[in-house]
Amino acid sequence: MKTRFHWPSGVPHLGQITSQLFRWQRQAKLILAGGRWSAQLGPRTRRSLRWLAVDGVLANIGEAIFGAYQSIYLAALGATRGEIGLLSSLMNLALPAAMIPGGRLATKARRLKPLVVLPGLLSRVLLLLLILLPLWLSPGPTLVFVSIALIVGRSLIANLMLPAWTTLISDIVPAQWRGRYFSTRNILMGVGGLVGLLLVGQLIDHHPGIGGYQLALTVALLTGLGSVYAFGQIEEPSRPAAAQSEVATVPLRQLLQGQGRFVAYCVIAALWNLTVQISGPFFNIFLAEEAHASASVIALTAATSALASLPGQRVFGPLSDRKGSVWVQRLTGFGIPIVPALWGLITQPWQAFPLQLLAGFLWAGYNLASFNLLLELTPTESRPQFVAVYQAAVGIGLAAGAAVGGWIAQVWGYRPVFWVSGVGRLVIAVAFSVLIAGINPLRARRSR
């Protein structure tokens, strides 16, 4: 007599398990596409939004690692404070140098994706050379200056793709959902950067010396290559050739006529980034040299900032959609100057953690709002050239700030650098509130 098998009560059937897995998979895809709201979009658009999110996560892991240890790596190779300040200044000069040709290329091109993918690959080749350089050159000035040249070249090539990248993603992400999409994407990027920094900090502690930093940069290289592949999977919307060629022939001065709000925003952005970059290159070096923090602690402080950005994205993303980008940028702009001013009072590594929490939360809102405001202030048909002008202004400010900060650090030390930066940021936040705060293109567009 055959015994019939009875499925245990309370245990889900295989069909139920499969159904649950499909449900989770669908939810994961919606999250990668920006949230449940993306279900109303077409499948091709959702797929592009998912790959754009993957690209952001992998790219941010690499850039978080590179940004956290770039200056310390150079110091390990023998660079002085002045040379590190020089590097920051040259890197930021690479931004305006790349913007005008980058903007022209993006305006004339029928396809923007190659203008992003190819520079992305070339910048990773230069990163590979930077990793291998200590194997070929002995310590000394030549090693330092060749390393600086590679980093500046990498920055120049990466900046060349910014106008095309900004224009392409503005075509992909629906305008009414940009706040929510970019907040979700930024959260995923923050989690990726957090995990990457924690793992790399442990890696460096277990491999002291230059070798540990080389391993860290290798991780940045591999994740960067992954981000290039992910961006290559995005489906690019078609662009009308006639309109693009017509805009490309218009002189830049003529394009900017009647764009007083945009020009004012560029000036404010240049001055803001000048004050930011006065202190920007020196936080981690200050922790290492004067607060005597280990590589793991430095990684944890950077990870703390990334962790604090996650609730910041959830708070400021919907606020940006509801109240407008100007409102969010003004609010966070008044809080950010507190952070560098308090850095000047640090005597122990643990004191950096609450400041990084505050900085990560506020910068999450500021960066989200400033990017969305840039898209709102730039006309669609000539966006690559307008983005190039904006990024060039930002780059000039960053270069000037790095030069000023390097000089102050060399003459008076790190603490005055932080205090000058804090006061400068507060002044520019007031200027933004006076000159730009009355502008809300999103609200005007909705009313029309």
Image: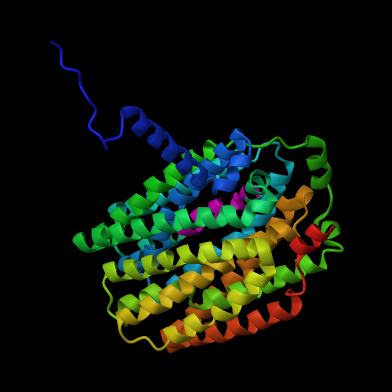
- Main SS type for the magenta part? helix
Residue 108 sits above or below residue 96 on the image: above
| Residue in view at x 57 percent, y 70 percent | 399
Residue 95 is situated, as x and y percent measured from the top left of the image, at 60, 60
Residue 96 is situated, as x and y percent measured from the top left of the image, at 64, 61
| Residue in view at x 63 percent, y 71 percent | 329
Q: Nearer the viewer, residue 319 or 439?
A: 319
Instruction: From the viewer's perspective, tell me whether residue 202 is left or right of residue 42.
Output: left
Indicate the quadrant containing the N terminus: top left, top right, bottom left or bottom right. Answer: top left
Residues drawn in magenta: 150-165
As drawn, the residue found furthest toward the front would be: 1
Residue 386 counted in the magenta span: no
| Residue in view at x 28 percent, y 62 percent | 201
Instruction: From the viewer's perspective, tell me whether residue 91 is left or right of residue 434.
Output: left
Which image quadrant is residue 286 in? bottom left
Residue 37 visible (yes or no):
yes
